[in-house]
Amino acid sequence: MKTVIVFILGLIAAPLLLVLAGMLGWLGSSGTGEPPGWEVSLGGRLVDAALEKRAKGLKNPVKADDAAALAAGRKLYAMNCAGCHGTAQAKSDWGSKGFYPRVPQFWQGDGADLTPEEAYAAIHDGVRYSGMGAWQDLMKEDDMWKVANFVARIDDLRRDQPKARPAG
């Protein structure tokens, strides 16, 4: 019985201590601090689960393998997303260092395991506590799907890119 009481008190005390540490300013608030591994892992899992749930029931109206739509998605990504999420040539300095949590750098294989529906949910409604804003009032529905299809395929496109040859 004593063990059960100690266990229950621990379940209550741990979150209260975390909140208290935050209220005392001990958890930090810098956007340039390096996130600890446990936080990156836990945060990634929570966002993945939330996007999977939000994506349920969404129907992609754009053919995922339509070359013209994919090219349009790539262009929209370059104009609207690459500043934070990076390009095929490089990570975004701002997105990979100046955000907390860090912004997924899709061209580098970071977070590119999204389905088009999950990517669309993130684009359309944003992602809370991440800096990813909602684009629902800024981009046409069809365009959001094109970007979502592109982001979902970016890992395949990255693998298909020719490797740079060394100079000389």
Image (cartoon, grey):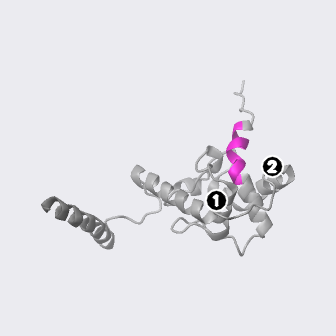
In terms of image quadrants, where is residue 125?
bottom right
Residue on which the image places disc 2: 65
Which residues make up the magenta segment? 151-159
Horizontal and vertical percent for residue 15?
30, 67
- Tell me the kind of residue under disc 1: Glu
54 left or right, relative to 17: right
Horizontal and vertical percent for residue 106?
63, 50
User: Considering only vertical position in the picture, is 152 above or below 99?
Assistant: above
Residue reaching furthest to the left: 2
Front residue (pair 34, 157): 157
Horizontal and vertical percent for residue 9?
21, 66
The residue positioned 67% from the left and 44% from the top of the image is 155
Residue on which the image places disc 1: 118
The residue positioned 32% from the left and 73% from the top of the image is 23
In terms of image quadrants, where is residue 21?
bottom left
Sequence order check, earlier mark of 1 and 2: 2
Secondary structure under badge 2?
loop
Front residue (pair 66, 99): 66
Residue reaching furthest to the front: 1
